[in-house]
Amino acid sequence: MDITDLILDDHHQIRTLFAQIEQIDRSDTDSLGAIWGRLNALLDTHAEAEERFFYPRLMQIGTGGNDADSAAEETEDAIEDHNKIRDASSAVNKEEVGSDAWFEAIGKANEENGDHLAEEERQGLTDFRENATLQERHDLAIKFAAFSAQHITGVKPVDKDPDQWVADHAKK
């Protein structure tokens, strides 16, 4: 088991759920609402799990993957992105399922999420694979998987101050 693989698995599931929403008739609000409920919970739980287990360790061992200057830059960007995704998800939840406004908000959430996943896969995950041992990738995967299983219905979404988060988790 490897935390980077679990993160990629979640990314695939998130992309799949957005694609499923795009393929459902707008009048099938029960199905749309059910799939959005699962996707919304996964987005929140995934971000929280990364912030608890992945990014703190990346801050300690990372050097900056691909086009990132440092692990701190990668992490600050990720926390900002998580906030944008949480805010976009909140906007979806304020609209009537299946309405034009709801689909517009879904599109914005998908856009925010897609930008984040691409950057994280290119930077943070690459940086982590290059600098973490296989054993710590396994150990963190267990924690990540357990947290995700314990919070299958989601977590309370809480925006975080990216600068403060990075300062709190900087190399000591």
Image: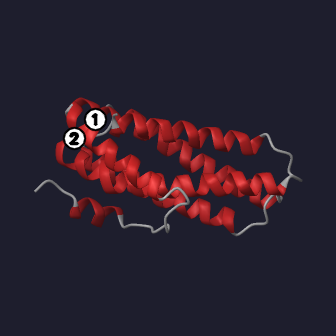
What is the three-letter code of the residue carrying label 2?
Gly
Quarter-of-image position of residue 19: top right
Identify the residue at the far right of this view: 27
Q: Residue at x 22, y 62 (%)?
A: 167
Tags 1 and 2 in contact by the CB under 8 Å rule? yes
- The secondary element bearing badge 2 is classed as loop
Residue drawn at (79%, 52%) of the image: 31
Q: Which mark is residue 127?
A: 1
Tell me where residue 61 appears, x and y as whole percent: 18, 42
| Visual colour scheme | secondary structure
**Which percent across, then down, holds residue 63?**
20, 39
Residue lying at 22% horizontally and 64% vertically, measured from the top left: 168
Q: Earlier in the sequence, mark 1 or mark 2?
A: 2
Q: Amino acid at mark 1?
A: Asp
Image quadrant occupied by the N terminus: top left
Q: Is 101 displayed left or right of 115 in the figure?
A: right
**Which quarter of the image is occupied by the C terminus?**
bottom left
The x and y percentages for residue 90 are 61, 66
Crowding at dot 1, Cα within 10 Å, few <14 / some 14-19 / many 20+, comes out as many
Residue 147 rendering spot, x and y as whole percentages: 40, 55
The residue where tag 2 is placed is: 62
Which of the 4 image quarters holds residue 70?
Answer: top left
